[in-house]
Amino acid sequence: MPLTIGEDGAWRDEQDTVLPAHRAVELLTGCDAAIPMLHGVRGEDGAIAGLLELCGVPSAGSPVRAGALGMDKQATKLVAASLGIATANAQLIGPGSAAVTTGLTPPFVVKPASGGSSNGVFVVADPGGVADAVDRARAYGDPVLIEEYVAGREVDVAVFRDRHGALRLGATLEIGVASGGVFGAAEKYDGSARFTVPAPIDAADEAAVRAAAVRLYEGLGCAGVARFDFFVTADGPVLNEVNTAPGMTERSQVPLMYAATGLDYTGLIAELLAAVPSTVPSSPHHGEAPQRTGATA
């Protein structure tokens, strides 16, 4: 049974009926497995993973630690640095602190450190506009990151571990973004984004992106499917962000990446569920929907 959580925080069933929290928990505990598809704070930040774990419901998604680290862009930078993966130079601006760009070269990207879906992301040409951008970004979350703008091709790749323990990577995908722009919230959800799969990059860049994604998947302790977003530059890939609960609609990158490898949407979901311990007793046939399984969306 699909369950949704509205912007008001209320749980709803497939008839859009508001459910008391205890009833939602009862429904969750009756599931063989859950597929978390919640984005943002209290979604992919590990909160839902923790709820499912406490309820004893196996999950086809990343655990608490991976979700929390992946959602925190500053923490992700620290993990990436330890793995030898480049990220944009940045300053973390804490709640109530003044905007500081010392040591950074304009233009800048200003964004919440734990935001998602490009909400509250602003490109600023010079230091004079940074303070206002930080104030606007704070409406979407604190603390705020001020990053140097990275000029490069935006290339993403997804990874999941299958039932045999092997890592399965999708095809790389390039996002068409206007020069000087960002892949914003509107483009992510209105169907206007231009995706090219596989990404038309050379073999060296392809290998570097895929290798970095694998290191991050392992280093963060991800499970289920995760998407890794990079800027491909003349100096190699630069990590943009990690999504441990990536979009899974028909317009989203991850299904397109795996479709390009021959794994269709139903097959992808079946593979993710089959990899969850003690949930699916036998391997579903490719193309068949797994049975008796619940999902949070």
Image: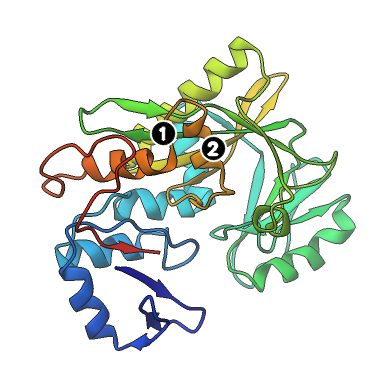
Front residue of 57 and 50: 57
Position of residue 108 measured from the top left corner of the image (x, y, whole percent)? 78, 48
Residue to which mark 1 is pinned: 159
Quarter residue 269 falls in: top left
Q: Is residue 66 above or below residue 160?
A: below
Going by the picture, which residue comes out furthest to the top? 203
Residue at (42, 82) in percent of width and height: 16
Residue where numbered disc 2 is placed: 256
What percent of the width, then of the height, locates residue 109? 74, 50
Residue displayed at 67% across by 57% down: 111
- In what quadrant of the picture does the N terminus appear? bottom left
**Relative to the observer, which residue lies in front, 99 or 262?**
262
Q: Position of residue 67 (x, y in %)?
A: 38, 53
Helix, strand or loop at mark 2 = helix
Image point (47%, 78%), residue name: 6
Q: Position of residue 157 (x, y in %)?
A: 52, 32
Q: Earlier in the sequence, mark 1 or mark 2?
A: 1
Label 1 sits on a secondary structure element that is strand
